[in-house]
Image (cartoon, grey):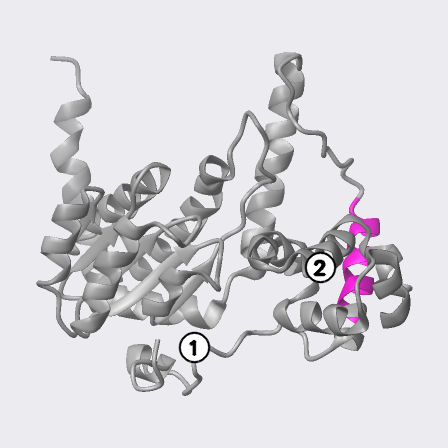
Amino acid sequence: MSTQQKKTFTDVAGATPAPLATPAPTAPAALQARIRSLAPSMTRSMQSVAEALAADPAGCATLTVTALAEHTGTSEATVVRTARILGYPGYKELRLALAALAARQDADSTPAVTADITVDDPLADVVAKLAAEERATLADTAAGLDLAALDAAVTALAGARRTDIYGVGASALVAQDLAQKLLRIGLVAHAHSDPHLAMTNAVQLRPGDVAVAVTHSGTTGDVIDPLRAAFERGATTLAVTSRPDSPVTRHADLVLATSAARESTLRPAAMSSRTSQLLVVDCLFVGVAQRTHETAAPALTASYQALIPRHSAR
């Protein structure tokens, strides 16, 4: 996104001006989620540092920048660069966040379930492991959610002439969920999983409209292309992705970052990401319903009444 193209929250929602490219400080509770989301885009040496931080925040919090560099087989400069990518001015601030995260983990009495699901696991273990991962994913997403961006997105959706939502694969289900929720409260919203239809609709958007891209990786061309078309035509654009530094965000006025459970052979990250995406969708929907309550409540009642006969025995 060029300097001329970048928008601020003021352009979208009338909030205090702030360039969207400026990274927000990472709260200790969201640190591990941010490490997981950004690690794939880091260099190998930086990944070594990130992996050490995620694996043992308490131990790393006790290390100096020199000691952590030696522990990870990297350099002090690499450690500092990793800290900055994670949203901290330097290693000192990251170290304080690690200590706070370690204290938070110590205070949590819930036993950790961290083992990957294997083909030999009994169903009881599968249920326990999946439930633990889902809880952690939702907690990480909530902790790392940019509330200023969420507020701006709610404002844009509540006042939009129409909303287009793009997603493919598992993300298409999430796009459909958001569209259906908005339709139930009387707003014009359409979900597009077909790339041709997505582009056809995107080029019809204009200022006052909203385009939403849902993509776990942030690199899905069939989602990026229509979002770029909507952005170029002046629509407010929103990206829901686990990679806040991915290509899709170059064409997004607003970015809402999600967390995904650890990837495994039996559970690809693109599938586990749906849980956190649906949480973001619910946050958007409830926020919009609050802002448009006078019109949303009658519309929701009308939709209930229209569907009641469909749930009755014929």
Q: Nearer the viewer, mark 1 or mark 2?
A: 2
- Asked if residue 29 shows in the view, the reply is yes
Pointer 1 local density, CA inside 10 Å: few below 14, some 14–19, many at least 20: some
Where residue 197 appears, as percent x and y from the top left, is: 12, 47
Give 170 or 109, whichever is nearer the viewer: 170
Q: Quadrant of residue 260?
A: top right
Q: Amino acid at mark 1?
A: Leu
Mark before the other along the chain sequence, 1 or 2: 1
- What secondary structure is found at the residue carrying circle 2? helix
In-image side of 205 versus 69 (left or right): left
Give 267 or 208, whichever is nearer the viewer: 267
What residue is rendered at 20% in x and 55% in y? 164
What residue is rendered at 66% in x and 73% in y? 84
Q: Is residue 99 magenta?
A: yes
Mark 1 lies on residue? 20
Pointer 2 local density, CA inside 10 Å: few below 14, some 14–19, many at least 20: some
Q: Which quarter of the rendered picture does the N terminus lie within?
A: bottom left
Q: Quadrant of residue 83?
A: bottom right
In-image side of 160 versus 25 (left or right): left
Give 312 or 243, whichever is nearer the viewer: 243
Q: Amino acid at mark 2?
A: Ser
Give 306 or 231, whichever is nearer the viewer: 231
Mark 2 lies on residue? 45
Compared with 66, 166 (above or below) is above
Q: Which residues are magenta?
A: 96-108
Compared with 93, 196 (above or below) is above
Q: Is residue 93 magenta?
A: no
Q: Which mark is residue 76?
A: none
In-image side of 2 versus 142 (left or right): left
